[in-house]
């Protein structure tokens, strides 16, 4: 069997999806993605994208696998806890066994303003697998300044939310949430807990958005802020498109990148399970 026919068989169920097809799969296979954070969201994102055949996946996380992660961080197991594996390396090891036809680059690092541009410059898409707003505003600055799409996602307790940002075409994170919530203003996984399925749903929605963008089907993306509570069974779609015209956004209109330039983001909000490097 030739490599082409092996790959055709591997992705056969995905290329049959009308919006993807062989042309879309080819684009997905030639694309490069960075996943910022490899916890609950990041492991589900990396799992979907590696199986979908994204050609290059960079997985960035500074933390090591701990036992409280296993409830929801789907790429890790007890042996990773015992051997104190860095999350990005453990994820890369699992996914290389799943798909040897793609390149996975694990990076053990704290994402900050000194490295974010280098992490994002050579990719087609940035995915938010983080657990705090400081890094999300930094990702937003980097994505807008580089003109690259990114997909925001977050989950805490039984609730999750996601939105897709195409700079210049859809509102950015700061168009929608003008300021970062202060420490303690929002619940964290440590204070409110988190339902595994809530994170998995949000990350799966993000991954679907990623595949649309990578397959060249930007017209199919979700242009609303989508939130849902899995316990209360309440999905909500919040129309945000008009904010792009209405707001004189400091980031995407005035191009003031305050997180990237270090005017914001020195404070560290509490995260979902700190087991820092
Ligand atoms: Zn904006």
Image: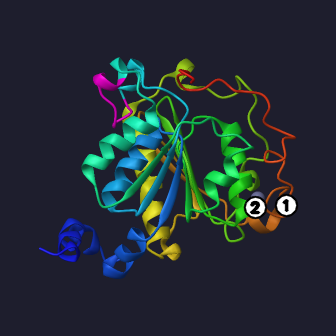
In percent of width and height, residue 184 lies at: 70, 22
Q: Main secondary structure of the magenta part?
A: loop
Q: Earlier in the sequence, mark 2 or mark 1?
A: 2
Q: Where does ligand 1 appear, by image quarter?
A: bottom right
User: Can see residue 229?
Assistant: no
Q: Residue at x 41, y 69 (%)?
A: 28
Relative horizontal placement of residue 157, taking residue 171 as reference (left or right):
left
Q: Is residue 245 visible?
A: yes
Q: Which residue is mark 2?
A: 145
* Quarter of image, res 182: top right
**Circle 1: is it few (<14), some (14-19), or many (20+) Cα within 10 Å?**
few
| Secondary structure state at the residue bearing disc 1 | loop
Which residue bears the numbered disc 1?
A: 255
Q: Are the residues tagged 2 and 1 within 8 Å (C-beta)? A: yes
Q: Where is the C terminus found, in terms of image quarters?
A: top right
Task: Give the left or right position of residue 103, taking residue 153 as reference.
Answer: left
Give how far across and how far down residue 6 sits, in percent: 18, 70
Residue 77 lies in the magenta-colored region: yes
* Magenta span: 72-80
**How far apart are the two marked residues, 2 and 1, measured between alpha carbons?**
7 Å
Q: Residue at x 63, y 66 (%)?
A: 166
């Amino acid at each position: 069997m030739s490599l082409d026919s092996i790959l055709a068989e591997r992705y056969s169920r995905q290329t049959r999806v009308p919006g993807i097809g062989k042309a879309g799969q080819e684009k997905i296979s030639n694309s490069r993605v960075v996943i910022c954070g490899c916890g609950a969201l990041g492991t589900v994102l990396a799992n979907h994208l590696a199986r979908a055949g994204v050609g290059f996946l960079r997985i960035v996380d500074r933390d090591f696998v701990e036992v409280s992660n296993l409830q929801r961080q789907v790429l890790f197991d007890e042996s990773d806890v015992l051997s104190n594996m860095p999350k990005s390396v453990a994820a890369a090891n699992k996914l290389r066994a799943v798909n040897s036809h793609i390149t996975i680059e694990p990076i053990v690092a704290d994402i900050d303003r000194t490295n974010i541009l280098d992490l994002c410059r050579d990719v087609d898409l940035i995915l938010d697998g983080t657990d705090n707003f400081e890094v999300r505003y930094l990702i937003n600055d980097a994505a807008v300044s580089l003109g690259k799409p990114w997909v925001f996602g977050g989950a805490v307790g039984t609730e999750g939310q996601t939105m897709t940002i195409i700079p210049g075409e859809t509102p950015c994170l700061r168009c929608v949430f003008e300021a970062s919530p202060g420490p303690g203003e929002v619940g964290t996984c440590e204070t409110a807990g988190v339902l595994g399925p809530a994170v998995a749903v949000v990350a799966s929605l993000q991954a679907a958005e990623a595949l649309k963008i990578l397959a060249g089907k930007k017209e199919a993306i979700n242009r609303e802020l989508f939130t849902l509570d899995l316990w209360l069974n309440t999905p909500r779609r919040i129309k945000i498109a008009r904010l792009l015209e209405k707001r004189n956004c400091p980031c995407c209109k005035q191009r003031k990148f305050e997180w990237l330039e270090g005017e914001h983001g020195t404070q560290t909000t509490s995260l979902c399970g700190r087991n820092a490097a």
